Amino acid sequence: MNMESVIPGRCDYGMSKTRPLVVGHRGASAKYPENTVLSIGQAIADGANAIEFDIHPTLDNELVIMHDPSLDRTTTGKGMISDRNYFGDIEFLTTQKEPRCPISRFQDVLDLLLKTENSHVWAVIDIKMHNSPEILVTLSKILKSYNEDLSVFSKRITLGIWHPKFISYAKTHLPEIPIVHIGVSLEIARDYFSDADGYNLNYIALSGYEAQNFIKEAHTKGKPVFVWTVNKEEHAKNCHNWGVDAIMTDKPKFFVDFYFGYRLLSSFVVKLKFRRFGGF
């Protein structure tokens, strides 16, 4: 797969170096309850190019949008998600954070993404390492219930995987969907995920000198490099200078506006320097 299939619209941003794309990490999670339709919808309204969210299977084989395998931290419930049914149980819980929101299923987010006005937005689905690879079978069944050949989703969804155990399942059950490796190590990315379609690495992993070589190597192969989680201006500037293709942030509106202003400022500085040397 090429860069275009992993990050739709990158010809306008991404490797063009205009600015990195902005991905709402668990939606607009700095302000709203993370991994909810409200938070994800707000990230889209804030101008995010994409949204990122996590999925976990319930006892009755529904997929809920949740970062943790447990309900304890973010919801009014207790216990492991995999031990509880969605219908008749989790569906009646809410988030702890205000405004209180219901626990979203994958289909709820999919319905939001498939609205005509959101056709420009794509998604990164984070498949947590402790999950069984069978989660991809469930994911495939849900996606195929909307679109049998997955053609609608091949440029709208990217799988984010932490562990190589998911690769064969992804290629078997979701062959049209691109894969990015999510991780914290350049060495692991090189050694175990050379066949990934792109990379989503944490900020620290991309801060060293060797990371510049990694980014160049990836781009030479047509593979995008994303960064998580960027919530500071200084880090956003560095990501721009490194030439990464997208940042994951809890504050999508702030960084959409930040990069727009940064682009204008950079353009102004270039024009000013040009004029000093006798240009227009």
Image (tube, rainbow, N blue to C red):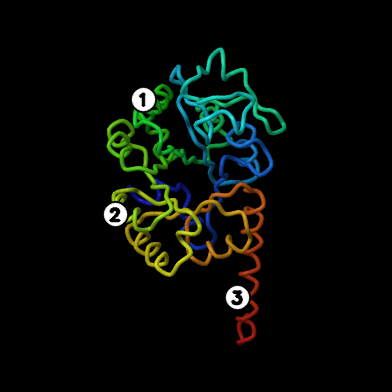
Query: Callout 2: few (<14), some (14-19), or many (20+) C-alpha neighbours within 10 Å?
Result: few
User: In terms of depth relative to the viewer, which is nearer, 178 or 54?
Assistant: 54
At label 3, the amino acid type is: Val
Q: Are marks 3 and 1 in contact (CB under 8 Å)?
A: no
Choose the circle earlier in sequence order: 3 or 1: 1
The Cα atoms of the two marked residues, 3 and 1, are separated by 50 Å
Choose the circle earlier in sequence order: 2 or 1: 1
Residue 50 location (% of width, % of height) = 53, 44
Choose the circle earlier in sequence order: 2 or 3: 2
In this rendering, the answer to whether 10 lies above or below 50 is below
Residue 209 location (% of width, % of height) = 43, 70
Where disc 2 sits, the SS reads: helix
In this rendering, the answer to whether 130 lies above or below 103 is below
At label 1, the amino acid type is: Glu
Q: Which of marks 2 and 1 is in front?
A: 2
Q: State the residue at coordinates (46%, 38%).
A: 125
Query: Which residue bears the numbered disc 1?
Result: 148
Q: Residue 226 carries which label?
A: none
Query: Which residue bears the numbered disc 3?
Result: 270
Q: Which of marks 2 and 3 is in front?
A: 2
The Cα atoms of the two marked residues, 2 and 3, are separated by 40 Å
Q: Do the residues labelled 2 and 1 touch (CB within 8 Å)?
A: no
In this rendering, the answer to whether 124 lies above or below 191 is above
Query: Which residue bears the numbered disc 2?
Result: 191
Residue 108 location (% of width, % of height) = 55, 26
At label 2, the amino acid type is: Asp
In which quadrant is the C terminus drawn?
A: bottom right
Where disc 3 sits, the SS reads: helix
Residue 85 location (% of width, % of height) = 50, 17
